[in-house]
Amino acid sequence: MTYENRIPLVDLVAQFRAIEPEVRRRLDATLTRADFILGHELAEFESAFASFCECRRAVGVASGLDALKLALRALEIRPGDEVITVANSFIATALAVTAVGAKPVLVDCEPDTFTMNPAQIEAAITDRTRAVLPVHLYGHPADIAAIGAICERYGLHLVEDAAQAHGARYRGRRCGSLGVLAAFSFYPGKNLGAYGDGGAVTTNDEALADRIATLRNYGSKVKYIHELCGENSRLDTLQAAVLNAKLAHLDTWNARRRELAARYEELLKGVGDLQLPKAQADVEPVWHLYVIRTSYRDRLLAWLQEHGIGALIHYPVPIHLQPAYAHMGWKRGQFPVAERLAQEILSLPIYPEMTEAQLNRVVAVIREFFDRAV
Ligand SMILES: Cc1ncc(COP(=O)(O)O)c(C=O)c1O
């Protein structure tokens, strides 16, 4: 296997090469301005990202986990409260609830979109429930109309985990503008990724945005005057500079991801027992991941890796079965759809710089697996 033949899950070097002058220009300007904390590029990014999300405000924070935590803190969710979220997500979604001292209450996901099953929410509501936290998993928006209607009926906050959904649309509206607050991650491999950790909270509520901006900065609006017991969770100005350079390309990159997803669908339809992801009507996903299902998952994963293709499982262990949460008393079998998915899902390479030839090779290797190995 030569290096050239390898196809990674994402290719951040290829992306850097494509935008290198602009990234270097902005980093350089920041280095000469030396405004590393709450600097010019951060202010520019917060304004640009709010516009991108078609909402009033974006507040840059240190990570996606912090964005979730600060969103919950701003809503004054605290010990004794419960937040309903979903069993199949990256563990950060539940950890944010745990971090503010509240209890994560899980529901299962839908088998076709892998997002929160709204039909299970009502049974999970108690008099301690304060919020519902759906995840736009893999860049596909959760069923916000159904979830939002329940939140309204029970007086619950709707907080979006939009860490994988920069630019996705639900009934024409951007993810990040659908709930009272939304959390984004700029982990490097995300559709919009920094060169290190980063995150943001978006909202149409000015007062909540101000509260988050204060909380992330040691609870301070005026230097050395601290109104709240805040945190140090500011998005670095250097990271904001990188994000500004990338944000200008995000719509084009997401469109390319949609093209690649359509191509995978065309070429993989009917191959073996593969089940391919499908966008729901009225939804524009951004294909953070292209996740297929097969009962031969482990063998196909090994085969792809042997052939130099960087497939991966997102995520192999659902949240309720994570050792970190053993104390919660969640049982195997409690969320059967999430558990079944964890056995069958496989993420294929998808990134804007991926070429037609690379995609064709992934498809050829998968076809060969079902022709020869099964
Ligand atoms: C769904 C989801 N929520 C939250 C996070 C946490 O983001 P971060 O790694 O930036 O803390 C991530 C990504 O890592 C994620 O995929």
Image: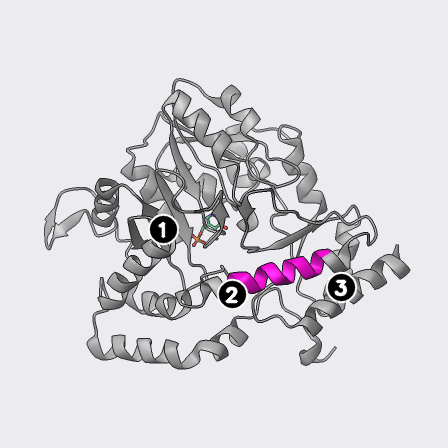
Marks 2 and 1 sit apart, C-alpha to C-alpha, by 18 Å
Instruction: Tell me the residue that label 2 is attached to.
Output: 253
Name the element at disc 1.
loop
Q: Do the residues labelled 2 and 1 touch (CB within 8 Å)?
A: no
Q: Residues within 10 Å of mark 3 (few under 14, many from 20)?
A: some
Question: What's the amino acid at mark 3?
Answer: Val
Q: In which quarter of the image is the N terminus?
A: bottom right
Could you say which quadrant of the image residue 243 lies in? Answer: bottom left
Marks 2 and 3 sit apart, C-alpha to C-alpha, by 21 Å
- Residue at 37% x, 55% y is 199
Of 77 and 290, which appears nearest the observer?
290
- Residue at 33% x, 55% y is 51
Q: Are marks 2 and 3 in contact (CB under 8 Å)?
A: no
The image position of residue 13, as x and y in percent, is 52, 75
Question: What's the amino acid at mark 2?
Answer: Trp
Kindly identify which numbered label has been placed on residue 124: none
Q: Residues within 10 Å of mark 2 (few under 14, many from 20)?
A: many
Which mark is first along the chain, 3 or 2? 2
351 shown above or below 228: below
The image position of residue 49, as x and y in percent, is 34, 57
284 shown above or below 22: above
Instruction: Tell me the residue that label 1 is attached to.
Output: 54
Name the element at disc 2.
helix
The image position of residue 110, as x and y in percent, is 62, 35
Is residue 258 part of the magenta span, yes or no?
yes
- Residue at 40% x, 34% y is 158
Kindly identify which numbered label has been placed on residue 363: 3
